[in-house]
Image: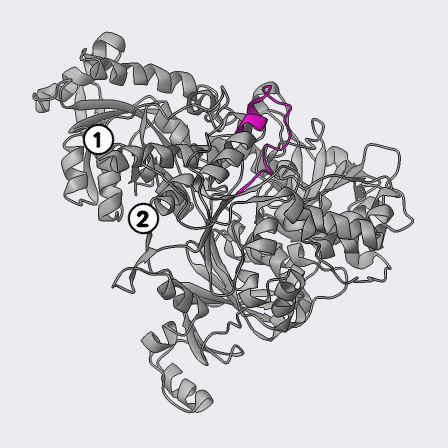
């Protein structure tokens, strides 16, 4: 089904794979007709060409990227624009689309969500952007329909910014990276490795894009096979997939932790652009005749079967047939995982879902950038035609990804088929994906064609004794399960004829509702603020010496951004840094906020010219111990902050708030064995936090310990990777090894200044 190659390989004409070895040069010459060097073959990938076309540096290995277009949604654009405004923004230098698909429900916290929308509209007018009103389209569908272009690059403040199937290299990052683009700066990265995904065969009826995606994620995630690399989809199997099918696989590449993705393009992608009235944006893309890849993933599409990602991660993937055949073992494994993820906060069991040897679920959702596509919903309608989802606990909600898709579903009768079963059609909204809509009942089990199934992402709250679960599935198998009134069923078991109707895109829907400045800024337009929109608090520069208190210690194999700052109802506070910070780690470590605030009183005392121990008495013996070896340490050269330890933090969303909320509460570092994604590490840096690493198997410090970093400012300036550090224990300083990892010169200066805002203020 999915095979990973050990080491790099050459691919000849997108088909023949030649593993790198001593004999590979001779084999290439034999197959291709002439010798090709490894360096030349590396430059023959599609990714290399697109990256270099957007690289403004003179060094092809040290990229300084300027993107063609930017996109954000209503959870992220307020903070981004506020940061850019504070740094001198006068107009958007490239097309910037502000969509409103996350805080669409204006029902939490009074007026604050709609206030954010009006902020976005007036900013689009003032600075020359595009504003997509609520319920018109989810961010990524609008980008596919209206922004993507062959050979182009798009940066979005959402982790699922992926348009590779359309020939566009897109990346999801935290807001500060978009701020840099808005201020004419660059996205600085080392040239990434590229991994080929070679597709062969053709999917069997009933298998959809989510099935292929979950099979790939299950194979690569735990191994880190594509971490921070570019996935390049090639091979004869690409031609056997429709544009919608490719898009459905592509959007889920985010869950592999890759940096970006790109696909070879053909007439089916040309047709996509034709349908959307943008024929000029199509570009045929293929790698060179001989291309070198740092890894190869072979996927036999014909061998893929309907998949399910059981709680609590998209990589916890099985075939549905395997789950049904081994229910006891699979459910036991999920319950064991829950003991780690939930840390015993609530009782968790899935055994009550088994009736007469069959597994039953309570909810089905087809939604968002992954599930809400035209073909997915039409296939679900075909499966459910003339059926009933029943009058019991099971419910089914379907969210088309845009109003043009919704309109076509109405016109071709698919909407009527679905509603006739008892299913509910709703408007374009990302809420079910992150816990702001269709939250299931306590102990309920939801199957979703969406992007993630992290703990509590569906909206439950451990601190309130609640737990619910999400499994990811394809729309087709969700429909098959709905047809059986909640009994877990793979779509391959359903007898159905898929009608595959043609899609017609009605552009007038957007013309009548979307505000498009055409890039013309109107500086006379006043930005409209609401009372929940707050400026960022002042942040201090990096001090000469630093004392950190470890206020949280997390030993999960991976810590998601959802656990660092929960989604759901917290989204309404994304425009209020202090208000949002109150939710930091609330579902993972409810004591965190109070402990961090207590430490922060010491730093506030320093900023007021007082002794830190006056405000935070427990610091007195710590400072006394430090001064036995570093007598010069004083309020004039010291900073006091908090830190957390997590094994591998930052998987999941691009949300900068996973870092900024810690900073607002006085956090000055994270310590990890590794960082799950480049974007989370970048978020830490852009908010002036030290991305520290520990290599020790046995952790040399623990929660409540104090860590002293002497001459930390000099260490950053001197580009030291090993950081001098001590645990303060029993009145003594015990040296421990901490490391920083590579930082660019700009990143070092951002940390030295205290955050990106300070960096731009000078």
Per the image, label 2 sits on a secondary structure element best described as loop
Q: Tag 2: Cα neighbours inside 10 Å, few (<14), some, or many (≥20)?
A: some
| CA distance for labels 1 and 2 | 23 Å
Pointer 1 residue: 542
Report the predominant secondary structure element of the magenta stretch.
Answer: loop
Question: Percent x, y for residue 551?
Answer: 36, 23
Look at the image and name its color scheme.
one colour
Question: Percent x, y for residue 514?
Answer: 61, 44
Q: Nearer the viewer, residue 49 or 275?
A: 275
Pointer 2 residue: 185
Question: Percent x, y for residue 487?
Answer: 81, 44
Q: Tag 1: Cα neighbours inside 10 Å, few (<14), some, or many (≥20)?
A: many
Choose top left, top right, bottom left or bottom right for residue 39.
Answer: bottom left
Tell me the magenta residue range: 98-116
Residue 355 against residue 323 in the figure, above or below: above
Per the image, label 1 sits on a secondary structure element best described as loop
Question: Percent x, y for residue 593?
Answer: 42, 20
Q: Quarter of the image containing the C terminus?
A: top left
| Residue 617 falls left or right of residue 461 | left
- Residue sitting at x 25%, y 34%: 761
Residue 282 against residue 623 in the figure, above or below: below
């Amino acid at each position: 089904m999915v095979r990973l190659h050990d080491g790099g390989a050459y691919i000849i004409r997108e088909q023949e794979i030649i593993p790198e070895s001593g004999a590979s040069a001779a084999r290439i010459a034999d197959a291709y007709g002439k010798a090709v060097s490894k360096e030349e073959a590396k430059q023959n990938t599609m990714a290399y060409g697109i990256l270099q076309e957007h690289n403004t540096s003179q060094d092809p290995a040290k990229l300084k990227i300027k993107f063609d277009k930017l996109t954000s949604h209503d959870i992220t654009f307020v903070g981004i624009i506020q940061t850019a405004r504070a740094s001198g923004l006068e107009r958007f230098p490239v097309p910037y689309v502000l969509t409103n698909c996350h805080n669409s429900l204006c029902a939490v916290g009074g007026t604050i969500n709609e206030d954010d929308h009006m902020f976005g509209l007036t900013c689009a007018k003032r600075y020359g952007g595009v504003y997509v009103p609520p319920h018109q389209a989810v961010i990524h569908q609008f980008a596919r329909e209206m922004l993507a272009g062959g050979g182009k690059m798009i940066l979005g403040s959402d982790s699922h910014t992926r348009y590779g199937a359309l020939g566009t290299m897109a990346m999801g990052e935290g807001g500060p990276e978009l701020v840099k683009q808005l201020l004419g700066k660059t996205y600085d990265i080392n040239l990434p490795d590229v991994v080929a995904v070679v597709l062969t065969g053709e999917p069997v009826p009933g298998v959809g894009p989510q099935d292929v995606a979950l099979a790939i994620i299950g194979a690569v995630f735990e191994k880190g096979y594509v971490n921070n690399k570019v996935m390049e989809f090639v091979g004869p199997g690409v031609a056997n997939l429709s544009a919608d099918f490719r898009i459905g696989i592509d959007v889920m590449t985010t869950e592999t932790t890759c940096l970006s993705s790109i696909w070879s393009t053909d007439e089916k992608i040309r047709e996509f652009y034709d349908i959307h009235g943008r024929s000029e944006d199509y570009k045929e893309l293929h790698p060179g005749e001989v291309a070198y890849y740092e890894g190869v993933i072979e996927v036999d599409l014909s061998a893929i079967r309907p998949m399910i990602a059981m709680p609590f991660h998209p990589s916890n993937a099985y075939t549905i047939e395997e789950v049904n055949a081994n229910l006891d073992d699979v459910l036991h494994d999920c319950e064991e995982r829950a003991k780690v993820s939930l840390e015993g906060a609530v009782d968790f069991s899935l055994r009550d879902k088994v009736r007469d040897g069959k597994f039953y679920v309570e909810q089905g959702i087809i939604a968002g950038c992954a599930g809400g596509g035209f073909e997915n919903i039409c296939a679900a309608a075909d499966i459910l035609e003339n059926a009933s989802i029943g009058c019991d606990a099971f419910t089914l909600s379907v969210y088309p990804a845009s109003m043009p898709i919704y309109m076509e579903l109405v016109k071709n009768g698919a909407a009527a088929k679905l509603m006739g079963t008892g299913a509910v059609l709703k408007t374009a909204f990302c809420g079910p994906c992150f816990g702001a809509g269709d939250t299931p009942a306590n102990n309920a089990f939801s199957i979703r064609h969406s992007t993630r199934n992290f703990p509590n992402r569906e909206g439950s709250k451990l601190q309130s004794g609640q737990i619910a679960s999400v499994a990811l599935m394809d729309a087709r198998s969700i429909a098959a399960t709905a047809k059986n009134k909640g009994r877990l069923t793979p779509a391959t078991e359903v007898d159905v004829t898929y009608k595959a109707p043609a899609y017609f895109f009605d552009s007038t829907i957007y013309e009548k509702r979307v505000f498009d400045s055409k890039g013309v800024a109107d500086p006379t337009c006043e930005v409209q603020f609401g009372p929940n929109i707050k400026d960022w608090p002042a942040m201090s520069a990096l001090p000469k010496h630093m004392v950190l208190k470890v206020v949280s210690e997390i030993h999960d194999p991976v810590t998601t951004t959802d656990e660092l700052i929960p989604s759901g109802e917290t989204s309404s506070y994304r425009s209020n840094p202090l208000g949002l910070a109150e939710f930091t780690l609330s579902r993972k470590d409810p004591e965190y906020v109070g402990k961090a605030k207590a430490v922060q009183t010491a730093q506030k005392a320093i900023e007021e010219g007082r002794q830190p121990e006056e405000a935070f008495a427990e610091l007195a013996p710590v400072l006394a111990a430090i001064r036995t070896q570093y007598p010069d340490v004083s309020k004039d050269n010291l900073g006091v902050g908090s830190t957390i330890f997590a094994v591998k933090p930052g998987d999941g969303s691009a949300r900068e708030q996973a870092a900024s909320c810690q900073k607002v509460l006085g956090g000055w570092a994270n310590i990890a064995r590794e960082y799950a994604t480049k974007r989370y590490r970048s978020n830490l840096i852009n908010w002036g936090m030290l991305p520290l690493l520990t290599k020790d198997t046995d952790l040399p410090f623990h929660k409540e310990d104090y860590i002293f970093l002497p001459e930390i400012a000099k260490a950053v300036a001197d580009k030291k990777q090993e950081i001098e550090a001590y645990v303060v224990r029993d009145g003594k300083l015990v040296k421990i090894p901490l490391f920083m990892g590579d930082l660019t010169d700009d990143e070092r200066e951002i940390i030295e200044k205290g955050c990106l805002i300070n960096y731009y203020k000078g």
